[in-house]
Image: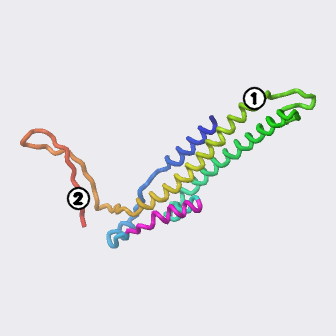
Amino acid sequence: MKLKITFFSILILFFSATTQAQEISIKETELSSKKSVEYNPLSPAKAAFYSAVLPGLGQAYNKKYWKIPFVYAAIGTSIYVYDFNNTAYNRYRTAYKLRLAGKQDEFTTDNGKVTLSVNALITAQKGFKKDRDLSLLVTTAFYILQIVEASVNAHLMQFNIDENLSFNPQLIQNDFLNKPIVGASLKIDL
């Protein structure tokens, strides 16, 4: 249950950060009106490659430095959960093997009293193995997600977001039929 809560908390934090297309300052607006941004088709591929080599490097390539802590928090937390579950699984697995061999394990006291039964050891192994495998899947998903995010962000950075572009949906009254007609206008000022 803790794994699910941790996973969803990280997922919400990762995506609830304010997503912005690009922030445009007055200087950038002036520059974009004077000089158009060149399209670089290799930029998304570079960002994805950099993220695949080192998580967070694609975000740095895109100059979105604020995303790097989220990348490392997500991947680091899921690796920590994997390590915790793997350690616990190995602990109960070792105890189970020692119990079957007739030797004393950590869940048996010195006078021979058993604190956990064999069935409890088997149940604990199954639970920790399931959680370990799930956390490995989550780690892989976060790794792939940060690669995709870097690539998509690099794609979106190449769009023209000049203030001269506008989309204005409006209702148009048709005087002939006396019914409103839905329409859209696109105004491009060059």
Viewer-closest of 23 and 109 = 109
Residue furthest out toward the left: 176
The picture places residue 137, in percent across and down from the top left corner, at 59, 45
Q: Amino acid at mark 2?
A: Lys
As drawn, 98 above or below 15: above
Name the residue at 33% across, 62% down. Answer: 162
Which quadrant holds residue 134? top right
Label 2 element class: strand
**Disc 2 + disc 1, Cβ < 8 Å:** no
Residue 169 in the image: x percent, y percent? Answer: 24, 48
Q: Is residue 148 or residue 190 the one in the foreground?
A: 148
* Amino acid, disc 1: Ala
Image quarter of the C terminus: bottom left
Asked whether, in this view, residue 152 is left or right of residue 190, the answer is: right
Q: Residue at x 50, y 48 (%)?
A: 15
What residue is disc 1 on? 120
Q: Residue furthest front?
A: 101
Q: Return the x and y of residue 141 as percentages of the image width and height.
A: 55, 49
Residue 106 visible at all? no
| Residue 32 highlighted magenta (yes or no) | no
Q: Earlier in the sequence, mark 2 or mark 1?
A: 1
The residue positioned 27% from the left and 53% from the top of the image is: 167
- Is residue 20 shown to the viewer in this render? yes
In this figure, which residue is indicated by the disc labeled 2? 187
The part of the image, by quadrant, that contains residue 123 is top right
Disc 2 packing (10 Å; few <14; some 14–19; many ≥20): few
In magenta, the rendered stretch is 39-54
Q: Mark 2 vs mark 1: give the one in front.
A: 1
Q: CA distance from mark 2 to mark 1?
A: 70 Å
